[in-house]
Amino acid sequence: MSVSKRENIIQSIADSYTERELFSGIEWLAEKSGKVILSGKSGYQNFQEKTPIPTNAIYRIYSMTKPITSVMALKLIEKGKLRLYDPVSSFIPSFGNLKVMNPDGSMEDLVRPIIIEDLLTHRSGLTYDFLPGCHVAPLYSEKDISDDGSVNLEKKCESLSQLPLAYQPGSRFNYSVSIDVLARIIEIISEKDFEVILREEIFDPLEMKDTSFSVEKENLPRLMSTYGASNFKEIMNIGPHSLKETDVNQHNPFTKGDHFRRGGTGLFSTISDYLSFGRMLLSGKSKSGEIILSRNMVNFMRMNRIPDSQLPIMLGPLPFAGYGWNLIGRTVVDNGKTMSLTGKNEFGWAGAASTYFWVDPDEDLVGIMMTQYLGSMWPITDDMRVAMYQAID
């Protein structure tokens, strides 16, 4: 099969999603050995107005913020300012008073403190408002933990320290607000605003010019419209797909302000900006050769940290068969158990609005797929990743 025919498979899969009105606009990009080998678009920036996807379209990347925050923590580890075994309470004292709430409502003391590794690997005992089956999630919902974009990181961590943990630290993988707490610790150590830190240490060296916690007024015409759930509480309430534009500014505002910073969500970015970040995860270097992470840290970062007894990792009721978690995101631990085509050492993560990226060190490959539908259960990320892999000769 010719390269053009293989690329047409990707286009036809993306078109099938936009033509069925499941997604408004989809964009994809793959780079192998430093060269873009696949790229394309399907659909619209705004479905109602049928506006085309602009050049350098800006997306809300939600949890694809997490790997960026995690890399910043690894940079502090390399500088000797942070360690994986440091207790969270040594930076945020109120976290030393936490209790664990059992499913029956009874409370128990911590067996051991939360440490930095627990935050990076989502084994802190913290949780998310939207996780079905988690007995502490309703308490998060009552406090509006995820949907209140008006508070800064310090106040968010104050609220979290007043709530019980769902599990003993280290006892299980439970996707959570852990990386928001990590971002606050990064602020405390660096004595700077979190966005300033990311700009100086990651965005500027990687030339990620459009990545920020806000969108400048002149760039708003490039912002993709968002569809699906309007808040985090509704993410798991899956119903028919509807391409009716939703307002998500309460939890992810685009206006510039000093308060909205998050470690686990909140960034705006472009597919080309995120490619710069993904490329760095292969070598630790920027395109110009500037070292962001050392070669040894990159190798250390990639290793799975979840013990077999806690696998498969779950996001609510959804298992990630064949995957564990390293220091920045999911990682393949047994390709014989993964349920769709991927590389044996692939790693990466996704965002709540159906954005997705992966890095394959064996193929020297970075793949990215962007769209904006909050809370979709359609397998678009698997379908697009499989299509990109089959296009590689």
Image (cartoon, rainbow, N blue to C red):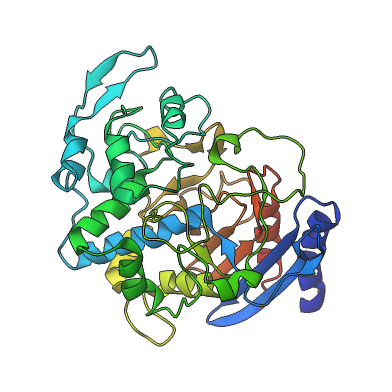
| Quadrant housing the C terminus | bottom right
Q: Quadrant of residue 101?
A: top left
Q: Position of residue 384 (x, y in %)?
A: 69, 59
Q: Nearer the viewer, residue 31 or 344?
A: 31
Q: Nearer the viewer, residue 57 or 150?
A: 150
Question: Residue at 38% of width from left, 52% of height from top?
Answer: 326
Q: Nearer the viewer, residue 269 or 1?
A: 269
Q: Is residue 363 visible?
A: no
Q: Nearer the viewer, residue 205 or 380?
A: 205
Question: Residue at 60% of width from left, 39% of height from top?
Answer: 235
Q: Position of residue 190 (x, y in %)?
A: 21, 64
All told, the count of numbered labels is 0
* As drawn, 88 above or below 263: above
In the image: residue 356, left or right of residue 246: left
Q: Position of residue 23 (x, y in %)?
A: 75, 54
* As drawn, 377 above or below 258: above
Q: Is residue 91 visible?
A: yes
* As drawn, 234 above or below 90: above
Q: Quadrant of residue 287?
A: bottom left
* As drawn, 202 above or below 17: below
Question: Residue at 42% of width from left, 51% of height from top?
Answer: 264
Q: Quadrant of residue 145?
A: top left
| Quadrant housing the N terminus | bottom right
Q: Position of residue 29 (x, y in %)?
A: 63, 71
Question: Residue at 79% of width from left, 55% of height from top?
Answer: 17
In the image: residue 276, left or right of residue 172: right
